[in-house]
Amino acid sequence: MSTLDLSGRVALVTGGAQGIGLAIVQLLLEAGAKVALVDISPNLRETGQRLGRSFKPENVLCLTCDVTDSTSLRKSFEKVLSHYGSLDIVVNNAGIADEVNWDKMLHINLHAVIAGTYLALELMDPEKGGVIINVSSMSALYPVVYAPAYSASKKAVVTFTRCIKSAAEGANVRVNCICPYYVKTQMSQRGLDAMPEQFKNEILQNGLMDPEDAAKGIMELITDTSKNGTVLRASAKRGLSYHIFNDNTF
Ligand SMILES: NC(=O)C1=CN([C@@H]2O[C@H](COP(=O)(O)OP(=O)(O)OC[C@H]3O[C@@H](n4cnc5c(N)ncnc54)[C@H](O)[C@@H]3O)[C@@H](O)[C@H]2O)C=CC1
Ligand SMILES: CC/C=C\C[C@H](O)C(=O)/C=C/C=C/C=C\C=C\[C@@H](O)C/C=C\CCC(=O)O
């Protein structure tokens, strides 16, 4: 049971129907937040019903949305605001790993994260403030030869997050990102099944995180009000640590 108290806070999580997104949804609900799951998954409704049985059903809102559809994404954000009366926490988590359909992947992994960040900055109450967490990947920090477009999308999320920090401060909003190493979800399982053995062995040696541990990193970024513009690394091997950039060299 969570010792954190987010009662009265309203969170929106994209990709909340499974994996890391569902893990952060559960931690947010345990902390008493009202949570909107924004996802394209056909399992979204069933997931929402199951959550409604474990938590207050009035604290769970499921919105079917393709985050690459800007109109649908805006309507989902606005629906959360009209339904719950505020928007305090946004986790731009939805993402795919697909080097064949890389154009679609960039729309999900990058375009929708930027759109979700700007929607959050527009709709969050500057008096109350808010926090946005963008989900990147360790592949942003260590380019991955078998996932070049994916790595690029995740590197761009880090750069965008670090750049938007100042504008967010003006709106009394914090923006941070997390860079998990491999996490035990359907995405990484598909990735491991498809990749050459030598890469798979290194990953298995480093270990895969449980989604709940990645979600705990996201919760840290949500609840630690000193964090803005930070990049949190997360892995089974080394836990949580903040990535330090040397921006001064020119
Ligand atoms: N699993 C891993 O090893 C790692 C994952 N990540 C990132 O974490 C995030 C979550 O990944 P996982 O939970 O592993 O993935 P997952 O594949 O288990 O879940 C992704 C969720 O996003 C939803 N989604 C996909 N495309 C969507 C769209 N167009 N519109 C709305 N929802 C959509 C899916 O329906 C699903 O519910 C992704 O951004 C991923 O890149 C980062 C590092 C490691
Ligand atoms: C195939 C796509 C599926 C999932 C991708 C996911 O986003 C992901 O976790 C990708 C990680 C890629 C890592 C790439 C390089 C790793 C470099 C190594 O030097 C080890 C780095 C970190 C290990 C753990 C740690 O030290 O914290």
Image (tube, helix red, strand yellow):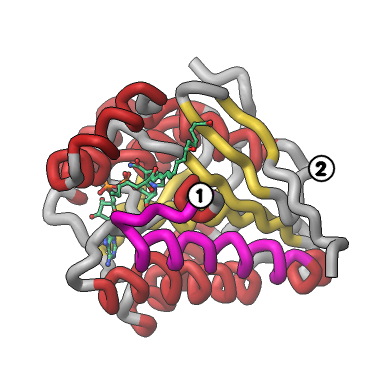
Q: Amino acid at mark 1?
A: Tyr
Stretch of the chain drawn in magenta: 142-165
Residue 48 can be seen in this image: no
Can you tell me whether the CB of the residue at mark 2 lies under 8 Å from the nearest atom of ligand 2?
A: no
Q: Residue at x 15, y 43 (%)?
A: 46
- Res. 101 image quadrant: bottom left
Q: Is residue 63 magenta?
A: no
Q: Earlier in the sequence, mark 2 or mark 1?
A: 1
Q: Is residue 152 left or right of residue 51?
A: right
The residue lying furthest to the top in this view is 1
- What label does residue 142 carry, if any? 1
Front residue (pair 175, 238) = 238
Q: Real-space Cα distance between discs 2 and 1?
A: 26 Å
- Residue on which disc 2 sits: 226
Does 70 sit above or below residue 232?
below
Return the x and y of residue 181 as percentages of the image width and height.
44, 38
- Asked whether residue 78 is in view, the answer is yes
Label 2 vs label 1, nearer the camera:
1
Q: Quadrant of the C terminus?
A: bottom right
Horizontal relation, residue 250 to residue 179: left or right? right
Who is closer to the viewer here, 245 or 223? 245
Residue 61 percent location from the top left of the image: 35, 51
Q: Looking at the image, which residue is at 26% across and 41% down? A: 188
Establish if 145 lies above or below 225: below
Residue 224, compared with residue 62, is above or below; it is above
Q: Amino acid at mark 2?
A: Ser
